[in-house]
Amino acid sequence: MPFQEQAGVIVGGSGGIGAATARLLAARGARLVLVARRSEPLQAIATELSAATVVGDACEAATSQQAVDTCLARHGRLDFVVHAAGSIVLKPLRSLSEDDMLATFRQNTLSAFHLMKAAITPMTQAKRGAMVVCSSVAAGTGLPNHEAIAAAKGALEGLVRAAAMTYAGSGVRINAIAPGLTRTPLAAHITSSERALAASLGVHPLGRLGEPEEAAEAIAYLLGAANVTGSVLPLDGGMTAGRLLR
């Protein structure tokens, strides 16, 4: 059990990828603090996994700080953090408002920044730690109507790479995954529409949806990969490699 005795925080712990990651890490011995805005679904998975909870908005710095403090107080250590919260706004540039852009950056970039900042001091003091955040294939691939999320996740990937280099000598590794369309509640407005789903699958060379459990396996790999930092691992069915000619 590679995570035996390790402890960490998962922001977005009741969402599709976050919950799958929580179940996987708990099964491998990790002790968890789960963070989400809605109490009822969060408490359900926390009870299942005997995890601690913090109910709050990840866009607020105090939420991530409380989660890190809870992990340290309850378990005496902080080995990893996972950021699996976010949003999807699909609008063309001319339809995007300033509020759309600011909300997308707050939910996807600023919330990850708060978690990373809260975790970095205890991790550098312990001279160990791993962080994984969830980006998107949209950050590195031009997709129509993805301007807001592409900008927010692109900024997130830049943050990951720079912070990984800043703390590479301090025992802290920082990485990201970049999924394509994944079967989660967040993507339900796409996957529930036959037309939208078919269009999306058509640009994935493997022609299939990602599954939350696959993303969880990738996150677990990056948390344990001692020689990997500053990387963005694509989980996109081949989209960033190229497109099939159909």
Image (spheres, grey):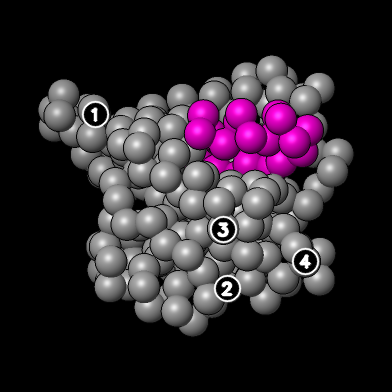
- Dot 4 corresponds to which residue? 4
Q: Which residues are magenta?
A: 116-144
Q: For marks 3 and 1, give the one nearer the viewer.
A: 3
Q: Looking at the image, do the residues carrying marks 2 and 3 touch, with CB atoms under 8 Å apart?
A: no
Q: For marks 1 and 2, give the one nearer the viewer.
A: 2
- Dot 1 corresponds to which residue? 101
**Distance of mark 4 from mark 3, alpha carbons?**
16 Å
Q: Looking at the image, is 20 positioned above or below residue 180? A: below
Q: For marks 4 and 2, give the one nearer the viewer.
A: 4
Q: For marks 4 and 3, give the one nearer the viewer.
A: 3
- Dot 3 corresponds to which residue? 74
User: Foreground: 134 or 19?
Assistant: 19
**Distance of mark 4 from mark 2, alpha carbons?**
14 Å
On the question of residue 163 being in view, the answer is yes
Q: Looking at the image, do the residues carrying marks 3 and 1 touch, with CB atoms under 8 Å apart?
A: no
User: Foreground: 80 or 157?
Assistant: 80
- As helix, strand or loop, the secondary structure at mark 4 comes to loop
Earlier sequence position, callout 4 versus callout 2: 4
Earlier sequence position, callout 4 versus callout 3: 4
Identify the amino acid type marked 4: Gln
User: Foreground: 184 or 198?
Assistant: 184
Q: Looking at the image, do the residues carrying marks 4 and 3 touch, with CB atoms under 8 Å apart?
A: no
- As helix, strand or loop, the secondary structure at mark 2 comes to helix
Q: Is residue 203 left or right of residue 129?
A: left
Q: Looking at the image, do the residues carrying marks 1 and 2 touch, with CB atoms under 8 Å apart?
A: no
